[in-house]
Image (cartoon, rainbow, N blue to C red):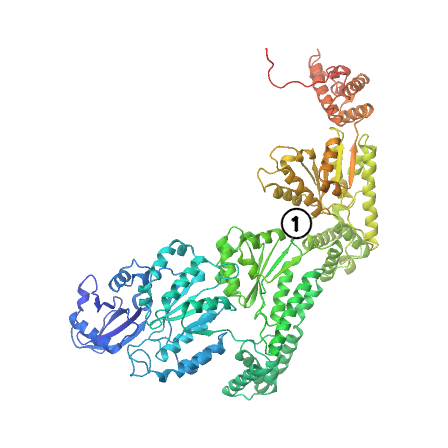
């Protein structure tokens, strides 16, 4: 479709005929041209003339403007326009500038044009504004201006060659000049000798080539109009509205649609979703449909197809389907120092310098060579303007020459600054090596360019996987600086976004703003479930691959799940960097570097305290690695300030005091406790019996103390896993000892948290396949730095829903992965625990220590009864103690005897019996003495079971 506004004037000022009717008249000329007065154009007296305007829409590709004017003058007479009419001008417009903004086919004017000109398909396609848009380009300013514009394109060499061919074809046309079709064109003749295939990463790069070609073709008469219809099929693949109307959209892509494009250009952008891993079928169907329609209409529509760089397979498929000559506009090959290409670049620089009135000199040659060596060459003008600034400063602004020299020195000193910062980071040896490998590939590509050989392109997008605090963000920031220094990226900024933010923002705007920079997406796995966002992100990663580097970061397992969510991810990720957790020694180095940065003095005694804290097993995921060290350092500084504020020296605070950290500042409340009444170790010693258990626990603690001495002397002190199995009958103290173990390991500096997580089968086994392993993993992550106590662990291997084996496998896996972070204690009956360890070799190899909890002797149970009564504020008479002894001797041999649990229940029953006895007395409860209220007598234990009296009682009702 082509649109025109035609201006007229008349010498009579009375009202026009259409001013007296509610609807403006409309006329269709020969079935292909629609004419209507401009409703928005008001008439007014100007030099005794009254202007008015007609709007024209036509399906004709070639329009004879002189004939159109004559036809419109006749139409004005037919419409009874008064006076002597004169045509003052005709101008081609876009639909928007002629008829107003296109808002859909339902508006009156669009519906009228669509119906009268049989252009329904065209306007239906226009209803998809997300990926279809029309624009009329400005007229060309001449061949020289076109050449100047072409030099800014990434395919400037091929584009300049094509502009030369277009300019040279002007003389080939004969038969006079067709008005409105450019100088030298044959009237009524449309012919396109070739279509165009443009290699471009994005719309901006593509239009840098297509716009100048449309203007040149129009100027030379080969293209009647500069109106262009853009169809971005990559956008169509993710737009929901286009998916809903896809079938109708395809039906509208027919011969009728193509006929309405006669004399116009069609630019189709495709390829972001077409790769080795597959393609988006809807996009490809539309592309093939358009190619099929276009190849039979090379006499009416100028077709441009834009595809991503380096897609030779896609280029060949398009060429095979079109069966029409293709002009391929590929990106410029990299500039080189030697060979013909270097001389060609130098010749362009010389010509540009003389054009600007400057004499080329040695410094210009040096600038070009320097930029070629470090792959920083983009185009001739970039090198030229850098040299021009230096030259003009030396010639006319000598006072600024020292500043310019200082700037150049600083730029040179920055060349390897970022790489040096990377090397200065603590640890990360493999990460550093992978970055060095990447830079080595850049260097080899530069060498290939210098020798005139094609470069081996590669993808710089990355995945950073690892736990929080392992340096991912810092390395990404340094990586951006390195790419800037190596002139791979123009700006080298780090634009950080969270994965949770991406579904709610415009990714196109993000990538457009990030040109020349690195986009760092932390917790990128949060995109799982947002398939549309993922698809668009992949497309933009491909389209902007030479201008934007994307770094996806997150936990290892979660990032692997993200890469599996869409096949396009892996093919667009060039490098996968794994960030390991820092070792205790590396964390100590980080602490020291933080202290140096703040000017704090850390003496040897304080370093020993820091080393002890960092050697503790288990740190929660959100507090780990460098983040944990930062919190430790900041807390130590805070405690130091509080300590100094509370103890001001008489002579005042010296700079040495203010800048020195002491051990108590680091340890704080985490200082290993000295055995005393409140310590967990003293409570363990107070437990009755369990002499062998106490000996084994003390042996483990002594080992950890020896490890501390080794660390303090700089010797190797590896952390040994402390997983245990507690075997014993009920009530033998397994749970109590396990609870104390967590506290003891925290107090002795073995574990960082020391919490106690008691769980059973119901806490570990899921209700469906695949639910168990995540449940176990979540528990272990929550319990990092603490103790997990699995009571009745043998139940995991019993029947029920059959997921126990899955739980056992998951527990063994986590016991190995987090062997330095979590202490697991399996508890149960001796025989069942032995069977559990025997049925799965993974358990036995990971449980270093087995503690057998023997049944308590009658004497120990009596002592436990006295201890429990004393802890509750009661005393046992001699008769009561004798009754307890009889009860425990009688029940001890029975199956399921509860040991200390039996004593506790016995004592509970005695307390109830005592209350009944006291309430039945004559004096009443209020009159009783404190001693009477807190004394248990033999009568209170009268209901205690006697030997042989313990039996199971049925639950429910007895039969009569």
Give above or below for 482 relative to 727.
below
Residue 304 position by quadrant = bottom left
Residue 741 rendering spot, x and y as whole percentages: 76, 39
Count how many numbered circles sit on residues in the image. 1
Within-10-Å neighbours for mark 1: few <14, some 14–19, many 20+? some
Would you place residue 875 above or below residue 16 in this image? above
Q: Is residue 180 left or right of residue 276?
A: left
Q: Quadrant of residue 829?
A: top right
Vertical comparison of 532 with 821: above or below: below
Q: Nearer the viewer, residue 610 or 66?
A: 66
Query: In what element is the residue under mark 1?
Result: helix
Where is residue 510 drawn, in percent x and y? 51, 62
- Looking at the image, residue 815 sits to the left or right of residue 717; the answer is left
Residue 859 coordinates in the image, percent (x, y)? 83, 24
According to the picture, the residue beneath numbered tag 1 turns out to be 621
217 and 93: which is toward the camera: 217
Residue 540 location (% of width, % of height): 51, 62
Look at the image and tell me whether residue 735 can be seen: no
| Residue 571 seen | yes
Residue at left offset 44%, top offset 69%: 319
- 495 or 20: nearer the viewer: 495
Q: Is residue 938 left or right of residue 327?
A: right
Query: In this picture, is 857 found above or below 332?
Result: above
């Amino acid at each position: 479709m082509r649109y025109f506004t035609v201006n007229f004037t008349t010498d009579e000022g009375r009202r026009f005929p259409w001013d007296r009717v509610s609807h403006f008249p409309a006329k269709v000329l020969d079935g292909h041209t629609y004419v209507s007065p401009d409703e928005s154009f008001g008439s007014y007296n100007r030099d005794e003339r009254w202007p008015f305007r007609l709007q024209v829409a036509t399906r004709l590709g070639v329009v004879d403007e002189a004939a159109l004017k004559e036809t419109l003058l006749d139409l004005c007479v037919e419409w009874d326009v008064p006076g002597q009419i004169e045509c003052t001008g005709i101008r081609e417009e876009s639909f928007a500038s002629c008829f107003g903004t296109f808002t859909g086919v339902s508006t009156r004017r669009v519906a009228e044009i669509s119906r009268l000109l049989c252009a329904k398909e065209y306007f239906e396609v226009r209803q998809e504004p997300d990926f279809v848009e029309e624009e009329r380009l400005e007229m060309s300013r001449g061949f020289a201006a076109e050449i100047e514009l072409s030099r800014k394109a990434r395919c400037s060499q091929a584009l300049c060659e094509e502009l030369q061919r277009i300019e040279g074809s002007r003389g080939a046309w004969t038969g006079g000049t067709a008005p409105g079709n450019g100088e030298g064109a044959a009237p009524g003749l449309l012919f396109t000798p070739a279509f165009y295939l443009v290699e471009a990463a994005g719309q901006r790069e593509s239009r840098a080539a297509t716009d100048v070609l449309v203007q040149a073709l129009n100027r030379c008469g080969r293209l009647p109009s500069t109106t262009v219809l853009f169809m971005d099929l990559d956008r169509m693949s993710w737009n929901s509205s286009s998916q809903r109307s896809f079938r109708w959209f395809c039906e509208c892509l027919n011969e009728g649609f193509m006929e309405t494009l006669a004399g116009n250009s069609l630019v189709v952008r495709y390829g972001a979703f077409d790769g080795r891993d597959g393609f988006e079928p809807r996009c490809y169907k539309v592309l093939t449909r358009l190619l099929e329609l276009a190849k039979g209409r090379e006499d009416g529509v100028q077709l441009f197809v834009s595809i991503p760089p380096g897609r030779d397979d896609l280029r060949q498929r398009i060429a095979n389907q079109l069966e029409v000559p293709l002009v391929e506009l590929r990106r410029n090959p990299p500039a080189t120092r030697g060979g013909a290409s270097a001389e060609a670049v130098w010749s362009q620089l010389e010509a540009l310098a003389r054009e600007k009135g400057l004499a080329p000199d040695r410094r210009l040659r040096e600038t070009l060579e320097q930029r070629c060596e470090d792959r920083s060459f983009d185009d001739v003008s970039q090198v030229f303007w850098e040299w021009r600034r230096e030259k003009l400063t030396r010639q006319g602004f000598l006072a600024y020459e020292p500043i310019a020299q200082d700037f150049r020195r600083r730029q040179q000193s920055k060349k390897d600054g970022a790489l040096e910062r990377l090397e200065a980071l603590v640890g990360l040896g493999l990460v550093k090596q992978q970055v060095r490998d990447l830079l080595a590939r850049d260097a080899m590509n530069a060498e290939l360019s210098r020798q005139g050989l094609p470069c081996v392109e590669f993808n710089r997008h990355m995945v950073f996987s690892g736990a929080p605090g392992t340096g991912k963000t810092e390395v990404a920031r340094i990586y951006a600086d390195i790419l800037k220094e190596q002139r791979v990226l123009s700006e080298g900024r780090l634009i950080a976004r969270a994965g949770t933010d991406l579904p709610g923002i415009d990714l196109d705007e993000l990538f457009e703003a990030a040109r020349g920079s690195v986009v760092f997406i932390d917790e990128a796995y949060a995109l799982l479930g947002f398939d549309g966002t993922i698809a668009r992100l992949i497309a933009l990663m491909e389209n902007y691959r030479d201008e934007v580097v994307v770094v996806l970061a997150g936990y290892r397992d979660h990032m692997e799940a993200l890469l599996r969510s869409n096949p396009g991810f892996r093919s667009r990720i060039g490098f996968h960097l794994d960030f390991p957790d820092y070792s205790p020694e590396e964390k100590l180095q980080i602490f020291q570097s933080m202290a140096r940065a703040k000017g704090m003095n850390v003496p040897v005694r304080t370093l020993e305290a820091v080393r002890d804290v960092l050697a503790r097993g288990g740190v929660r995921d959100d507090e780990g690695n460098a983040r944990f060290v930062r919190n430790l350092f900041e807390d130590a500084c805070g405690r130091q300030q509080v300590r100094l504020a509370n103890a001001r020296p008489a002579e005042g605070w010296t700079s040495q005091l203010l800048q020195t950290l002491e051990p108590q500042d680091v340890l704080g409340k985490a200082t290993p406790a000295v055995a005393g009444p409140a310590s967990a170790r003293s409570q363990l010693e107070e437990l009755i019996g369990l002499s062998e258990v106490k000996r084994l626990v003390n042996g483990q603690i002594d080992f950890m103390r020896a490890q501390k001495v080794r660390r303090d002397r700089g010797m190797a002190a590896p952390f040994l896993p402390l997983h245990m199995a507690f075997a014993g009958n009920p009530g033998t103290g397994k749970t109590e000892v396990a609870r104390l173990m967590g506290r003891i390991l925290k107090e002795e500096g073995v574990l960082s948290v020391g919490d106690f997580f008691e769980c059973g089968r119901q806490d570990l086994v899921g209700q469906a396949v695949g639910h168990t392993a995540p449940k176990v993993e979540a528990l272990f992550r929550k319990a990092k730095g603490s103790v997990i106590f699995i009571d009745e662990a043998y139940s995991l291997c019993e029947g029920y829903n059959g997921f126990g084996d899955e739980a056992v496998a998951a527990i063994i896996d986590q016991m190995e992965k987090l062997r330095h972070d979590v202490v697991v204690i399996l508890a149960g009956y001796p025989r069942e625990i032995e069977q559990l360890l025997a049925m799965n070799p993974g358990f036995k190899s990971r449980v270093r220590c087995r503690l057998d909890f023997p049944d308590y002797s009658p004497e120990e149970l009596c002592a436990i009864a006295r201890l429990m009564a004393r802890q509750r504020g009661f005393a046992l008479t001699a008769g009561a103690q004798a009754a307890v002894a009889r009860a425990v001797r009688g029940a001890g041999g029975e199956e399921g005897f509860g040991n200390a649990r039996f004593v506790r229940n016995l004592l509970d029953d005695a307390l109830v019996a005592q209350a009944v006895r006291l309430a039945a007395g004559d004096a009443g409860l209020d009159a009783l003495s404190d001693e009477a209220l807190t004394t248990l007598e033999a009568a209170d234990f009268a209901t205690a079971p006697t030997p042989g009296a313990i039996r199971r009682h049925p639950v429910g009702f007895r039969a009569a």
